[in-house]
């Protein structure tokens, strides 16, 4: 090989190496979520989502908790990719009929309304996964909770998993060991777990999910359990879908009353009361802190929501930007 040919070969390899470095670097940068991801491509995104959420919550206050729950259930199954927004079809099985969602997951039409508004402004730009993440944040802040900068740039899933939804979302019967395992397996700390569970402060639960606790468990305030029994008969043949606020003190406000209830054995769900065992459990000190330091709970909740929003995201060329959140693009 001549010296000129050898030099050309070396130069070519050098250029290819540079191109590879640039491609890998740009992919890494592109894959990072950012609060200003849509600042140029859809600058009115945030006010549009917020105004639609405000209108929805004004019509029905419960929708704030419903949207927050949708985001949680999305992120815990395959990651934050809007897979739980799919409708079933004769050829497609989504996650809406999975046990944790069937008959209880709600608020889908709110996400549809937001998506329609956003598509009119910025067609094909904003993912359903990002819309759900922003809507969950706005639901919390509208009801008095903390604000955080939502990181954006997620893309939407093109598949769903009913089987994963059945097994990935911790049920209200979970004990503390199971809860810790579920959260830590997704990269969330024990503090994240307790803070995120505090989102139940604006939630409601069905009788079937707390019946065993109010009739069978000893670590419950008796006056509290008697009150809850009025709407939840012992027989499992009636009242299964009767609702009760998880936080009986301030059910429509995002605050730290949920943790005060746990300290007083007034947790409605078995899995919630597992977080506090009067000094004998690994999460007791966190619950106590949150019960008398609302600002600490607020900041930890915001940080945990940001962290949860990073789970299993699709970016770059993965997934798609759905035109309709209920189905893949045709």
Image: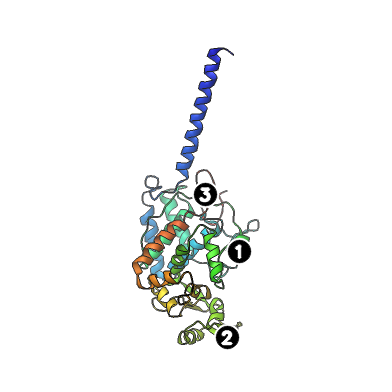
Please say whether residue 232 is visible from this viewpoint: no
Please say whether residue 282 is visible from this viewpoint: yes
Rendered location of residue 243, percent (x, y): 50, 77
Q: Which residue is mark 1?
A: 167
Q: From this viewpoint, which residue is outermost toward the top?
A: 2
Q: Earlier in the sequence, mark 2 or mark 1?
A: 1
- In the image, 92 versus 194, the foreground residue is 194
Q: Is 102 left, or right, of 290 in this rendering?
A: right
Q: Which residue is mark 3?
A: 314
Residue at position x 54%, y 82% from top? 217
Q: Quadrant of the N terminus?
A: top right
Cα distance in 3D space between marks 2 and 3: 45 Å
Q: Earlier in the sequence, mark 1 or mark 3?
A: 1
Crowd rating for badge 1 (residues with CA inside 10 Å; few <14, some 14–19, many 20+)? some
Cα distance in 3D space between marks 2 and 1: 27 Å
Q: Quadrant of residue 288?
A: bottom left
Cα distance in 3D space between marks 1 and 3: 21 Å
């Amino acid at each position: 090989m001549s010296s000129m040919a050898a030099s050309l070969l070396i130069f070519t390899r050098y250029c290819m190496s540079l191109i590879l470095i640039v491609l890998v670097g740009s992919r890494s940068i592109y894959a990072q979520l950012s609060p200003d991801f849509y600042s140029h491509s859809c600058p009115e995104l945030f006010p549009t989502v917020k105004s639609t959420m405000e209108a929805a919550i004004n019509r029905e206050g419960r929708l704030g908790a419903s949207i927050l729950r949708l985001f949680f259930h999305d992120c815990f199954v395959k990651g934050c990719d809007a897979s739980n927004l799919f409708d079933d079809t004769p050829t497609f099985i989504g996650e809406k009929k999975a046990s944790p969602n069937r008959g209880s997951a709600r608020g889908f039409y709110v996400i549809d309304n937001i998506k329609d508004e956003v598509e009119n402004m910025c067609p094909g730009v904003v993912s359903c996964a990002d819309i759900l993440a922003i809507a969950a944040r706005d639901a919390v802040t509208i009801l008095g909770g903390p604000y955080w900068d939502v990181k954006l740039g997620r893309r939407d899933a093109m598949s769903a998993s009913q089987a994963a939804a059945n097994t990935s979302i911790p049920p209200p019967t979970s004990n503390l060991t199971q809860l810790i395992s579920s959260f830590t397996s997704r990269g969330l700390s024990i503090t994240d777990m307790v803070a995120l569970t505090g989102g139940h402060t604006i939630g409601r639960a069905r009788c079937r999910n707390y019946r065993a606790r109010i009739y069978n468990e000893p670590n419950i305030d008796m006056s509290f359990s008697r009150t809850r029994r009025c709407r939840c008969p012992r027989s499992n043949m009636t009242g299964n879908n009767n609702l009760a606020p998880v936080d009986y003190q301030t059910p429509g406000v995002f605050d730290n009353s949920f943790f005060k209830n746990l300290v007083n054995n007034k947790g409605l769900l078995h899995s919630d009361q597992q977080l506090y065992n009067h000094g004998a459990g690994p999460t007791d000190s966190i619950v106590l802190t949150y019960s008398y330091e609302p600002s600490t709970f607020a900041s930890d909740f915001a940080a945990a929501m940001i962290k949860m929003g990073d789970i299993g995201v699709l970016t770059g060329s993965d997934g798609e930007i759905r035109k309709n959140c209920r189905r893949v693009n045709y």
